[in-house]
Image: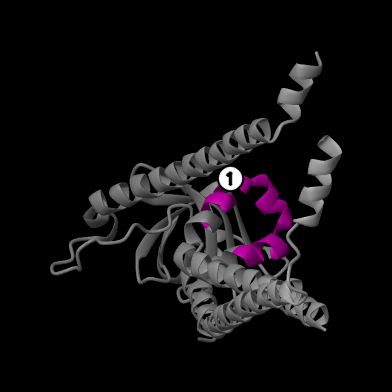
Amino acid sequence: MKDKITTIFQKAAYSPEPELALAVWSSVIAQERKQTRLKLWAFGFTGLASLTGLVPAFKILFTDLSQSGFYEYFSLLFSDTGSVVTYWKEFSFSLAEALPVISTILTLSLLFVCFLSLKYLMKQIIRSQLTFNAAL
Amino acid sequence: MEDIKKVFESKVSFKILFTIGVAIVALLIFCLGVMVGFHRASFGRAWEENYERNFGLMPGRPPFDNFPNASGAIGKIIKITLPTMIVEDKNNTEKVILIKDDTRIQEMRENIAERDLKIDDFVVVIGTPDAQGQIEAKLIRIMPIPIN
């Protein structure tokens, strides 16, 4: 009895259309490609924008460094190393107070965004090549 | 024993430790900021309170709106009245520099005496602020005038 039921159910098993697997696979690939393209443009734009912003940011940073006197204090490290080591506390305070914090934060933030965007951009480029190979 | 080992090797324990580590670093940085800020504000207050005593009466001087650098000065010497001198700092703030017996004054590779300092010399000073809004110099270096 059990064998007969098994045979009946095996005969009645669902047989998918021959193109179904291919259709599903193509759909997945297309969706993957769309997402990769979107991410590629997004990271490319962000990377380019941050790279462009770095030029004025560096200009501002160098201007602030020379205006605040940080460069002059820092140069004492090379010209008067012995004195700087003896009076390291006063020297550290001078450097800390002369550091242009806002422009440094701005420049480092843009650098961070730039490198992160480049990293993810490369990832998307590699992924798009893999997707292309998979589609073939 | 194995269960205890699993707990300490789990992702949750790593996240907890990471969060504690980040909090410690953030608090240390905050502490440092408070220290530097207090140091600067104390000198700024003393500098403002003793302005007339140090530099004389100046009617119509601009209001005090920025704390000057408390541990040094960079600029031209505008007055010498030993053992003090007045330096005009980068943001046009005048600072009184007190030259003590242990102050090192350097020009190029030579140590020079305080009487060799001249008006219009461009100097970089590092020192300690005092309660009178002056900076007790530890090191004075005479530098070539920067090209701006």
Relative to A79, residue A118 above or below: below
Relative to B35, residue B47 above or below: below
Instruction: Provide the secondary structure element on which disc 1 rests.
Output: helix
- Which residue is under mark 1? A89
Q: What's the chain of the residue with tag 1?
A: A
Colour scheme employed for the rendering of this structure: one colour
Give the image location of residue B74, x and y in percent.
Answer: 49, 67
Q: Is residue B145 visible?
A: no
Give the image location of residue B43, x and y in percent.
Answer: 36, 48
Residue at 52% x, 67% y: name it: A104
The residue most toward the right is: A3
Taking depth in this image into account, of A101 and A85 the one nearest to the observer is A101
Relative to B70, residue A63 above or below: below
Residue type highlighted by circle 1: Lys
Give the image location of residue B37, x and y in percent.
Answer: 41, 47
The residue most toward the top is: B1
Query: Where the N terminus of chain A falls, by quadrant?
Result: top right
Question: Magenta span has A105?
Answer: no
Q: Chief secondary structure of the magenta span?
A: helix
Residue neighbourhood size for the residue with mark 1, other residues' Cα within 10 Å, grouped as few (<14), some (14–19), many (≥20): some
Q: Is residue B43 visible?
A: yes
Which quadrant would residue B116 be assigned to in this image?
A: bottom right
Horizontally, residue B128 falls left or right of residue A134, namely: left
Residue at 67% x, 72% y: name it: A28
Which quadrant would residue A107 be assigned to in this image?
A: bottom right
Residue at 58% x, 84% y: name it: A48
Q: Find the magenta span and give its range.
A: A74-94
Give the image location of residue B3, x and y in percent.
Answer: 76, 18
Taking depth in this image into account, of B17 and A98 the one nearest to the observer is B17
Which quadrant would residue A136 be assigned to in this image?
A: bottom right
